[in-house]
């Protein structure tokens, strides 16, 4: 980019910094194409001649930022024009941004780039000394429309040696987010609140949760209609506030917008959540850093109020109108959903309506957790947790067939590794938080790459990632004990699956069979990937460990008197816990003698052992299929995911086996979590029976299992097009209709089939 990073003077260390930059310029004549490139540390809203064009950029890491490209020719006109950019920077590490300092860089191709000729000003209407919205996201929004920005001055050009300038500046590698407007399905709460005397109190979240509500009946149903009539509100006696809750009946990741005219000084407080708590939105949570509220103070004009520069996640929004000194008019309410633009390439349909509903909710869950990268959830964090990708990577490719967001996720990981080669649990990860290095994902990221390669045939991305895996594995080898088993430092988070924590167990500082099985799987995977992509790898140390680890793990962790493999070495601390997951990993790692394999096979259907949460049923489902016990997996999907769907939820929860919904994690549980979507994988690879055998589905297997279903049908995206299949029971046989795209071949019990539509029985 032919430009410089710029900012106002004196903001290098300012937290929660809002500033604006502009450039006025003349255009002689209309042009067919003019590109505008822009990046910011860390957020921007771009406007051209007063028209808002977009938000960005895609999140970066400590070593790289991304720039967006806009075609703006149609927004320019002969004569004087103006480009304006509102920027915001938390100026400290969150789980979404890793800012070096507040700054922006931009270029109008063929005209100019950001430099000292640009105007800048501090935006005083945004209050800086506010609470966090959540620790993962950063500060809440607090905007006073009555205040004006500071005076325009010339921009400060940031040194080319500064931390922000030395970051790699890369073109955005995923599409811009798709925006869709939704209107409330209902208004379940109308209430009068207590008079709030202290309008400068930052703790809005506490007020929201604690203040008394008196029911009101305002008859405002028309507000839920697109383009409905405006509604007038009269002030309540004693300056009481008016609380309204808008239920959008779906997961939104984006913006809430209240179109309102009200007297100067009217305060609008806004809280976000996914369900009601005691007849209101709960914003005061067990974690002090969770507040989930924003505030806006009106200037007397008609305004569109709501989060603007930052996205929020919600199904429900509560507003409280305070300090209303005259009539107010609400002209409309809507939500602007902003997510990755997916095409639902895959389909699943069967004779079981519950399974069909589970599929539909799983696809919606994934979509709602796809922004500029995969995120854990829209509401609480919007963070890219690398461990969640073990599920999202595979189910995302299965549902949508779009590898770009997956490739971006892997490249972000590679760009944000710690100096010792270990991969952070969340990306970007605060450099001061070594405790957020999760041990297990450093190992099973190789499993993600195996899946990615099989589904996409993208060998270049895999080659980029192998050195990252290799360095992480060598770092792990330094934590081997005298028997060659992993015993990692306690400073790292030895997180596995929430089922353990929800039952009072923590593996921090513990030696676990689970981590050692993941180690064995990682060593096998890196050899496999290197061999298939032609990457030259130092093999001896890897092959040595692959040979010795199965016996050493069994010797250390198999408790013959119990007949099970223990989760951890310190049985006193863990209560002698045995789980389905440990035995599933032993089977998947192919680390069992014939006797132990039979024990592990029995263990994963023994429901007296600890079941994983939704998350790591991903591995248990694979082990159940491997051992011919897939019917048990189907039973669990119907029971646990089915019971969840029967509540009416449009998306999968973060937890639903040992704790359910919001009740998990002290009412902080998410109701939309991408890592819970493993039933999609089961329906596609087991019920429909479609699995890639070679990268990109060049050959694939067709081994459907209908169980008690009369029929199942679906569509499976591949790089060459969609595979289509329909399976019906016909006596003791299955009738199959299979459509195969060009260049692919199917391996079935009835033979090998190539391009075209084929009908056969098995």
Image (cartoon, rainbow, N blue to C red):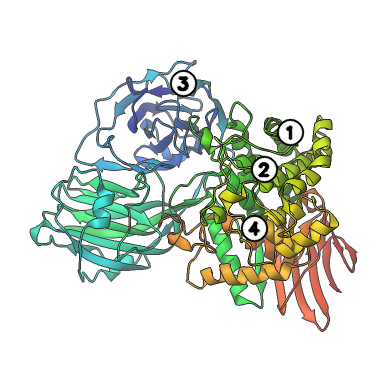
Q: Earlier in the sequence, mark 2 or mark 4?
A: 2
Rendered image quadrant of residue 564 = bottom right
Q: Position of residue 69 (x, y in %)?
A: 52, 36
Marks 3 and 1, the one that precedes in the sequence: 3
Q: Which mark is residue 482?
A: 1
Q: CA distance from mark 3 to mark 1?
A: 54 Å
Task: Point out the residue furthest to the right here.
Answer: 751
Badge 1 element:
loop
Q: Could you give the CA–CA distance between mark 2 and mark 4, rounded to whole angstroms?
A: 22 Å
- Provide residue 512's location: percent of width, then percent of height: 65, 45
Q: Indicate which disc residue 579 carries.
A: 4
The answer to whether 377 appears left or right of 470 in the picture is: left
Which is nearer the N-term, disc 4 or disc 3? 3
Report helix, strand or loop for mark 4: loop
Question: How packed is label 2: few (under 14 Cα within 10 Å), some, or many (20 or more)?
Answer: many
Distance CA(mark 3)–CA(mark 2): 37 Å
| Viewer-side label of 4, 3 | 4
Say whether marks 3 and 1 touch (CB < 8 Å).
no
Residue 4 shows which numbered tag?
3
State the residue at coordinates (69%, 38%). 486
């Amino acid at each position: 980019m032919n430009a410089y990073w710029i900012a106002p003077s004196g903001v290098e260390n300012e937290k929660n910094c809002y500033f604006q930059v502009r450039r006025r310029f003349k255009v002689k004549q209309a042009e067919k194409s003019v590109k505008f490139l822009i990046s910011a540390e860390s957020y921007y809203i771009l406007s051209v001649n007063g028209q808002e064009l977009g938000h960005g950029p895609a999140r970066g890491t400590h070593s790289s930022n991304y720039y967006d490209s806009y075609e703006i020719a149609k927004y320019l006109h002969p004569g004087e024009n103006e480009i304006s950019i509102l920027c915001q920077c938390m100026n400290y590490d969150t789980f979404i941004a890793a800012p070096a300092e507040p700054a922006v860089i931009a270029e109008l191709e063929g005209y100019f780039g950001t430099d000292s000729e640009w105007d800048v000003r501090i935006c005083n209407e945004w209050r800086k000394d506010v609470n966090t919205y959540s620790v993962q996201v950063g500060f809440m929004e607090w905007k006073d429309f009555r205040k004006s920005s500071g005076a325009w001055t010339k921009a400060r050009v940031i040194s080319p040696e500064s931390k922000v300038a030395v970051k790699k500046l890369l073109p955005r590698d995923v599409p811009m987010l798709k925006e869709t407007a939704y209107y409330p399905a209902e208004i379940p709460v109308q209430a009068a609140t207590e008079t709030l005397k202290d309008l400068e109190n930052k703790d809005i979240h506490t007020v929201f949760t604690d203040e008394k509500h008196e029911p009101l009946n305002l008859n405002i149903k028309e507000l839920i209609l697109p383009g409905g009539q405006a509604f007038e509100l009269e002030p309540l006696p004693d300056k009481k506030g008016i609380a309204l809750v808008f239920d959008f009946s779906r997961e939104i990741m984006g913006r809430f917008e209240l179109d309102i005219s009200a007297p100067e000084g009217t305060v609008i407080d806004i809280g976000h959540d996914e369900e009601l708590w005691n007849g209101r939105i709960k914003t005061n949570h067990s974690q002090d850093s969770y507040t989930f509220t924003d505030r806006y103070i009106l200037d007397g004009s008609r305004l569109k109020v709501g989060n603007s520069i930052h996205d929020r996640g919600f199904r429900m929004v509560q507003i409280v109108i305070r300090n209303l000194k005259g009539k107010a008019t609400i002209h409309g309410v809507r939500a602007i959903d902003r997510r990755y633009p997916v095409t639902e390439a895959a389909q699943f349909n069967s004779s079981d309506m519950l399974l069909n509903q589970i599929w539909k909710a799983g696809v919606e869950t994934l979509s709602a957790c796809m922004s500029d990268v995969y995120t854990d959830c829209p509401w609480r964090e919007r963070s890219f947790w690398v461990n969640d990708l073990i599920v999202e990577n595979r189910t995302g490719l299965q549902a949508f067939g779009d590898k770009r967001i997956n490739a971006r996720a892997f490249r972000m990981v590679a760009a944000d590794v710690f100096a010792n080669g270990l991969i952070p649990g969340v990306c970007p990860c605060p450099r001061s938080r070594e405790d957020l290095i999760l041990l297990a994902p450093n190992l099973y990221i190789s499993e993600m790459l195996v899946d990615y390669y099989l589904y996409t045939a993208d060998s270049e991305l895999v080659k980029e990632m192998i050195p990252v895996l290799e360095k992480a594995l060598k770092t792990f080898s330094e934590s081997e004990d005298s028997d060659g088993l992993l015993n990692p430092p306690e400073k790292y988070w030895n997180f596995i699956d929430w089922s353990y924590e929800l039952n009072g167990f923590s593996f921090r500082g513990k030696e676990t069979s689970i981590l050692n099985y993941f180690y064995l799987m990682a060593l096998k995977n890196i050899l496999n990937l290197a061999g298939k992509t032609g990457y030259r790898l130092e093999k001896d140390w890897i092959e040595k460990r692959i040979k010795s680890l199965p016996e050493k793990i069994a010797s250390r962790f198999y408790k013959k008197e119990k007949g099970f493999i223990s989760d951890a070495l310190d049985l006193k601390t863990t209560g002698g816990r045995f789980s389905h997951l440990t035995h599933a990993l032993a089977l998947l790692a192919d680390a069992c003698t014939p006797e132990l394999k039979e024990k592990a096979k029995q263990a994963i259907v023994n429901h007296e052992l600890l079941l994983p949460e939704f998350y790591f049923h991903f591995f248990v489902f694979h082990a159940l299929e491997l051992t011919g016990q897939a019917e048990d997996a189907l039973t669990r999907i119907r029971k646990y995911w089915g019971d969840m769907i029967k509540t009416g939820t449009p998306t999968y929860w973060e937890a639903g086996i040992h704790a359910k919904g919001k009740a998990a994690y002290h009412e902080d549980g998410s109701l939309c979590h991408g890592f819970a979507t493993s039933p999609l994988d089961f329906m596609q690879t087991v019920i429909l029976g479609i699995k890639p055998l070679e990268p990109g589905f060049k050959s694939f297997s067709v081994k459907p299992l209908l169980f008690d279903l009369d029929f199942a049908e679906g569509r499976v995206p591949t790089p060459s097009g969609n595979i289509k299949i329909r399976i019906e029971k016909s006596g003791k046989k299955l009738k199959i209709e299979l459509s195969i795209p060009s260049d692919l071949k199917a391996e079935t019990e009835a033979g090998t089939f190539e391009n075209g539509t084929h009908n056969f029985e098995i």
